Image (cartoon, coloured by chain):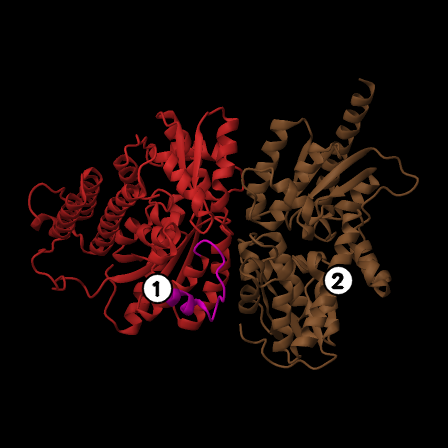
Amino acid sequence: MGNLWITIKTILEDLGIEVVVPPRPSRQSLDVGVRHAPEFACFPLKLNIGDLVGGIQNGADTIVMAGGVGPCRFGHYAQVETQVLRDLGHQVEMVVLEPPQGRLAELLMKINYLTGGKSLRRVWRAIGFGLEKLQALDGLDRALAWARPLGTPARAERAGPGYPSSGAAGLGWAHRRAVMAIADAAGVEATRREARRGLEAIALAAGLDPLEKGLAPSGRDGPALRVGLVGEIFMIAEPFANQEIERRLGDLGVEVVRSLYISDWVRTHLLPRVLAPRRHVRLVARAARPYLGHFVGGEGLESVGEAVLYEQRGFDGVIQVAPLTCMPEIVAASLLPEVSRDLGLPVLSLFLDEHTGEAGLQTRLEAFVDLLARRRVASGRGRGTR
Amino acid sequence: LHSSAMRLAEGAVIGLPRALLFFELYPFWRAFFNGLGLVCAVSAPTSPETIEIGAREADDGTCLPVKTFYGHAASLRDRVDAIFLPRLVSLTRGTYTCPKMLGIPDMIRHNLERMPRILVTCVDATRGTGLVESSVALGRSLGRSAAHARTAARAGLEALRVFRDGLEQNLSFSQAIVEQFPREISRLCRETGNDASVGPGRRLRARVGLVGHAYNLFDPGVNLDLVRKLAKLGCDLRTSEHLSLVEVEAESSLLPKAIFWSGGRRVLAAVSLFRRQRLVDGIIHVVSFGCGPDSMVGEIAEREIRRSSSLPYLALTIDEHAAEAGLVTRLEAFTDMLERRRAGVGSA
């Protein structure tokens, strides 16, 4: 899921566990997943099974998997995967880490088993290190999404030698390079240093002088269109699953802000309650209440609540990305049209799976962006960037 | 949803959509509302038109049972004083129904126009608000005293107990309903008439375990009259709804992790019980197209069965386009196969 692997690899390696990283999700791993997963399973499960098979082929003998207590299907991924892998003849052990509201003692025992009896303080420190990287990576993603609408070729030229000539490609290059540097960073300090460097490189590639803090980028045709991305966390965070929707929108001159970064999700779902960002959770629930008065599992409530909040923050539109047949997101998708009507907020719901064609998606995005740009002109807030 | 907090006069008519967990909880709500002096109106049995309306009003991605629910709710709106749309989060501790059932009161309210007053109560046994607590809260918001509401809720529980006892004795849904509401024999029995056993004078050809959600097994309009078709083919049926809660929990404890959807937990428990005690010759799993829990539970059930036995397993996926002829052919083939296997076992 996105760059989460870097965090998990960091934590486990810091605890002295050898980590096998499966190949990046690809058409190939997806085909493997689709072949072995239940036909009507949701899309992330299919990709997940493809990844697991890839990891096993690379030599993994134990799988660490997050669990859940429902009602979203993700909570039963591990059971189905155990069965699928067993029937495929793979002898692997599955360690399922469930959130502590399950059974705390059981969770601690599993951590103890995985780490070979390392002290909890040691484990806690490793997790802190991993989360530091996650924060840094999410920061890079944020910066990239912000800079994309700026990344014109002329600006890349100004950024100096060493960068590919096309602005968008230069940005992607600066971002990728920073991600790898953070992945390899050996400590918290090094992580922070690399994060700073990465942000500077992205700013440079976008044609901004990192020293001119606070200055609005000059030469833009008014502020870029801003779109909030809501939906299911895996589809938001994994570019392969969402067909690089952020890059596509960025290329169309749109600044994309995710409702949920992986670090937010980890804090609300995997860490003890005390560390969860409760204020924001309450804010979202309150925003959603006129439309949806109860959590529905997954990110269903968040999709509705965040859409309302985006409207309040003056965003031009909201795009919902979710796996086909995703239950919580179907609930959200049933309510978003009403949100859209009430608030005058354009909302595009995209349910994606292995059959989603690239051209169809691109066309829908272009049409949506055209609509947003026209609304911008009509509202007299300057013209869109296209 | 704050529309609940207003007195409802005696004799007011409350609409109950005949869909989803209606098929598990009807006796409770019926006895409860009657106890409050209110009248229950159940929507007409599922017809092709019900499903058509539902498919038109609901989001494309929703499953057939939810579309059916939309259809039933729509059919009630002009003839009742209020529609009852409980938010059924969790019926027993540690389980959930499914995300769509959690959201359905909101989905209906925002997608169906011209709705009358909507009554909502949130049943969440995992967080300590079970059927009784939530219905007492509802009764109070309708202007009844706490004692009055509690008496009505107790009557509801009693009705539910009698109903479940009936099911556990292998009665069909309509028979179990009829046991406690005899005056409805003529109407409800015809409407949901599902006779779960081979009629007199017919030869028993196979014992079939029929597993799935109650709203798929007991709604002939959704399952194309599957139960009667199987009975006609000479199948003796045991359904997952005939298991008691105790049996469900006992069988679930044999699994590495109990399923947290109450419907799925029951299905896997039934599959496990039928298989271990050799109660059936084959299993038919009725699956809704687009049902999230079914997609996972069906996979686990099928793989379990394949690995540990040679029990034939048929997954029947039903959706709004299901055709009668295709279903009959598959059921006939399945029954023929089971019969041949029975004969084979007998002669070997």
Q: Is residue A14 above or below residue B42?
A: above
Residue A284 lies in the magenta stretch: yes
| Snapshot quadrant of residue A16 | top left
Q: Is residue A268 left or right of residue B91?
A: left
In the rendered image, residue B250, in percent from the top left (x then y), is placed at 65, 42
Q: Secondary structure at mark 1?
A: helix
How would you classify the magenta stretch by its main secondary structure? loop
Above or below, A179 relative to A341: above
Instruction: Name the residue tied to disc 1.
Output: A280
Report the chain shown in brown: B
Q: Nearer the viewer, residue A156 or A183?
A: A183
Amino acid tagged 1: His
Magenta segment, which residues? A282-299
Q: Is residue A120 magenta?
A: no
Amino acid type, callout 2: Glu
The colour assigned to chain A within the rendered structure? red
Of all chains, the one bearing label 2 is B
Residue A346 seen in render: no
Q: Residue B44, position in %: x, y?
A: 74, 63
| Of residues B286 and A189, the one drawn nearer to the viewer in this rendering | A189
Choose mark 1 or mark 2, whichever is in front. 2
Q: Where's the N terminus of chain A, which quadrant? A: top left
Cα distance in 3D space between marks 1 and 2? 43 Å
